[in-house]
Amino acid sequence: MNLILKKTWQVVFYSLLISVVALIQASFINNLPGWLQDINLLLITLVFALFFYDFRTAIAVALIGGFWSEIFSFNFFGFYLVVLFFTLIFTNWILRTWLTNRSLYSFLVLIFLATLFYNLVAAFMLYWFSDASASFFVWRWPFWSVLAGQVFWSELAGLFLFGLAASLTRRFKPFFLEKN
Amino acid sequence: MFKNGKYKISIYFALVVLLLIILHGLRLLTPLENFLTVATQPISVRFYDWSSSLRNSYSANRDRTALRQQVSNLSAQVATLTVANSQCLQIQNENVKLRSALNFLDTNHFKAVVARIIARQAPTDEGNDILIDRGRSDGLQPGLGVVSETGVLIGKIVSVKDHSATLCLTTSANCQFAASILNQSQTQGITSGDLGLTIKMNYIPQLDKIAPGDMVITSGLTGDIPHGLLIGRISQVYNTSNEVWQSATIEPTADLKNLTVVSVILP
């Protein structure tokens, strides 16, 4: 019974946390000046959940965060959910196939690829569904400059988060096998 | 790609996403969306206010920097424009003088050559000569009278080269003119410069009545200088009873220090 209660509280707590992250993204970060508004906190949280927890937790982040994003979204409903879905599938595949979940470099590479993939999918969906008359986003310089900025700041945030996680858990501490 | 049931989870995930989209399309999610929007409004507003204040302070700082930059740019621009304006004023001034000179020449039916001053001799006790940009090729020759843009006699040509000429000013000691005072007896005399500052008129008969304020003009007796050109106004009269002649100091009417354009009156 206690375990169920504990699990329920955990679910509620993480749901609230993800909701707050989504709210911060929608109401706070998106309104910040300059490059600060390029930070995608929800995406970083998604990668963080996938890297430090598991695929299920990451799905929860994608669903809850995506739903909140849809509520505050200026795009059509389903945009963020679909983009986060594809990004999570892709990121998970990269992580399971190529990377380890115990290295800072893996985490940074994962953030880089996730940010790249997320923006490409998002831009492609916008181009396909909303802005097909405009020139293809790949040929637009602002798309790449914003993406570069977003990658840079996401990597910095990833560094910070990894440092925070490493200081709180023993998971990333180096260990050595000793010969008896 | 997926192991241990992750394929299934991904399918469920995709189905949930699809379901949410369908439910939204059917407007079944609208109450939930409305509730969440209203419930989170206070937090959203607070977040938005914080970001707005951050944005404002960022904008203020950026504006301050931009304004500083703008002030710097405008200062440089003002300096450039001041120079340009000064050049424009100079040109305008010159234009006025040229128009005035042309007007004077047209009114008096003088044949003249308009010239620009290109050099000026350093002032000495003898006066200071002026070099103009017209010479023999323009028909100039020594002895021709030179007037300012308003038609006041300022000097005469003393030497000529092909494309330049030197003139002496009326205030120079070596610059003499036959002059006439506009008084009742139209007194005749000779003017010459005095220390490069004023003009002195000598050889005025003792019996002629002259007074400060009387105008002095050219008499027409000096070579090619026509009659009636204004030289100046008498400022002081020197009259002693035991002398045969009286003399007078004449204040030049033209501003000889600020000449830029002059006209040489041709015979």
Image (tube, coloured by chain):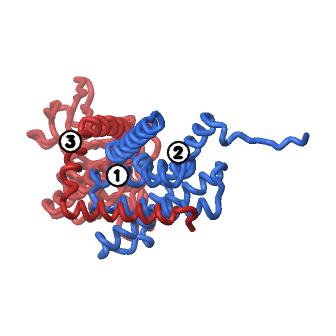
Chain colours: A blue, B red
Q: Secondary structure at mark 2?
A: helix
Q: Quadrant of residue B112?
A: bottom left
- State the residue lying farthest toward the front: A1
Spatial CA distance of label 1 from label 2 is 54 Å
Q: Which mark is residue A157?
A: 2
Identify the residue position indicated by label 1 in the image.
B84
Query: Can you tell which quarter of the image residue B29 is in?
Result: bottom left
| Quadrant (top left/top right/bottom left/bottom right) for the N terminus of chain A | top left
Chain for numbered disc 3: B
Is B46 located above or below residue B96 in the figure? above
Q: Nearer the viewer, residue A63 or A69?
A: A63
Element marked by disc 1: helix
Q: Secondary structure at mark 3?
A: helix
The label nearer to you, 3 versus 1, is 3
Which label lies toward us, 2 or 3? 3
Give the left or right position of residue B109, taking residue B46 as reference. left
Q: Is residue A52 above or below residue B99?
A: above
Taking A67 as reference, is B233 left or right? left
Residue at the image position 76 percent from the left and 41 percent from the top: A175
Q: Mark yes or no: residue B174 visible.
A: no
Q: Residues at marks 3 and 1, common chain?
A: yes
Give the labeled residue for mark 3.
B38
Q: Are marks 2 and 3 on the same chain?
A: no
Local crowd size for mark 1, using a 10 Å CA cut-off: few (<14), some (14–19), many (≥20)? few
Amino acid under disc 1: Ala
The answer to whether the residue labelled 3 contacts the one labelled 1, judged by CB atoms less than 8 Å apart, is no
Q: Chain of mark 2?
A: A
Between label 1 and label 2, give the one nearer the viewer. Answer: 2
Marks 3 and 1, Cα distance to the nearest angstrom? Answer: 63 Å
